Image (cartoon, helix red, strand yellow):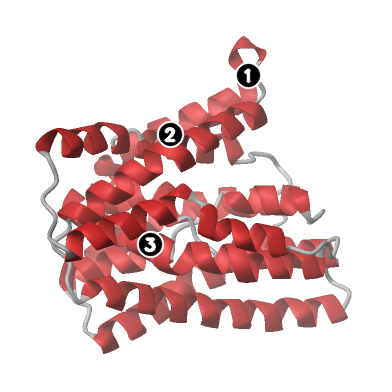
């Protein structure tokens, strides 16, 4: 099963290589900015529209987001309590607390999660990470995540960032796709082929961006990373399994939901850390550690779910 993840790992490695070698003297932060703009404005909307217009999901369209919102909320509250205690004990700084909360609670379902689900569960389930991300993770990040970043960082008002949530092209793509889907409007074949071609670029571009963000070094600060690993990779999966099973998710859909819930920290966390003067280095290190552990554990989780 690990062999199915080799393409994913190779593309991540290319991103890491670019970060270290900087071909054509282009720094990774500049390349990430260009790729991010391209993905947000063209590639991601195309992927979202294709997935939602061709999806066979029915009640899962509300079951998966509900599972995601409950999971994120509980992990977020748990992380806040834990890191606040550490802050009062003066074991961490406010900037570190903000970075740790972002790394613990908010996953990157359409980054590493999407290709992992497609490789291990099947491309038929690739709509699960998209729905989970758009209707659970992203709203949390751009509203609660921004507020917490401002609170623990520079305390700059984050209202403008929150309003940007409604202006993001992926959300307009989701709204249009859902309207067309429920109105049963026929979509011309050539339009669907165009969406497919554009959307197919999402996975490699997202993986390259994640690879460019990973920070590899000797100082991994495991004493601070262990809570992140516990919350992001283990508590999230436990909660998603309990909530998902309770509301009726089963089989491959439940497995895909668990893989998405455990996905490593969202890449936009780097931008939030920079914006609000949080510990960006710590966040990048947490992203690296959780990404490696996630890739190692994902096949084991899929095997366990297949036997359950």
Seen in the picture, residue 137 relative to 239 is either above or below; the reply is above
Q: Residue at x 38, y 34 (%)?
A: 204
Q: Residue at x 79, y 56 (%)?
A: 276
Q: CA distance from mark 3 to mark 2?
A: 18 Å
Q: Residues within 10 Å of mark 2 (few under 14, many from 20)?
A: many
Q: Position of residue 262 (x, y in %)?
A: 43, 64
Q: Is residue 1 found left or right of 298 in the rendered image?
A: left
Residue under label 3, please give it.
260
Instruction: Tell me which label, 1 or 2, sits earlier in the chain.
Output: 1
**Residue 224 seen in this snapshot:** no
Distance from disc 3 to disc 1, alpha carbons, whole Å, reads: 31 Å
| Relative height, residue 213 to residue 24 (above, below) | below
Name the residue: 24% across, 51% down: 51
Of pointers 3 and 1, the one earlier in the residue sequence: 1
Secondary structure state at the residue bearing disc 2: helix
Q: Nearer the viewer, residue 190 or 153?
A: 190
Observer-side mark, 1 or 2, equals 2
Residue bearing the label numbered 1 = 22
Residue 257: give x, y in percent of width and height. Answer: 32, 67
Q: Which mark is residue 205?
A: 2
Residue 269 vertical placement versus 304 (above, below): above
- Residue 93 location (% of width, % of height): 85, 66
In this rendering, does residue 63 appear at all? yes
């Amino acid at each position: 099963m690990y062999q199915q993840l080799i393409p994913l790992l190779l593309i991540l490695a290319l991103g890491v290589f670019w970060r270290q070698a900087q071909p054509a003297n282009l720094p990774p932060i500049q390349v990430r900015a260009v790729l991010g703009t391209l993905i947000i404005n063209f590639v991601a909307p195309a992927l979202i529209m294709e997935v939602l217009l061709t999806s066979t999901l029915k009640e899962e369209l509300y079951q998966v987001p509900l599972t995601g919102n409950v999971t994120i909320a509980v992990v977020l509250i748990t992380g806040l309590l834990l890191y606040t205690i550490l802050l009062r004990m003066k074991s961490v700084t406010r900037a570190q607390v903000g970075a740790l909360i972002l790394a613990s609670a908010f996953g990157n379902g359409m980054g590493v999660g999407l290709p992992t689900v497609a490789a291990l569960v099947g491309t038929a389930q690739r709509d699960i990470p998209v729905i989970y991300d758009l209707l659970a993770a992203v709203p949390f990040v751009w509203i609660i995540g921004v507020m917490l970043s401002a609170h623990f960082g520079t305390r700059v008002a984050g209202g403008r960032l929150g309003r940007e949530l409604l202006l993001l092209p992926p959300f307009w793509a989701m709204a249009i796709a859902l309207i067309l889907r429920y109105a049963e409007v026929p979509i011309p074949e050539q339009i669907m082929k165009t969406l497919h071609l554009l959307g197919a670029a999402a996975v490699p571009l997202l993986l390259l961006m994640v690879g460019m963000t990973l920070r590899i070094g000797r100082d991994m600060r495991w004493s601070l990373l262990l809570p992140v690993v516990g919350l992001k990779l283990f508590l999230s999966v436990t909660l998603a399994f309990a909530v998902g099973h309770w509301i009726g998710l089963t089989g491959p859909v439940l497995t895909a939901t668990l893989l998405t819930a455990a996905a490593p920290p969202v890449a936009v966390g780097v931008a939030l850390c920079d914006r609000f003067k949080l510990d960006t280095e710590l966040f990048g290190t947490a992203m690296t550690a959780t990404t490696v552990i996630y890739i190692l554990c994902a096949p084991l989780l899929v095997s366990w779910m297949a036997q359950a």
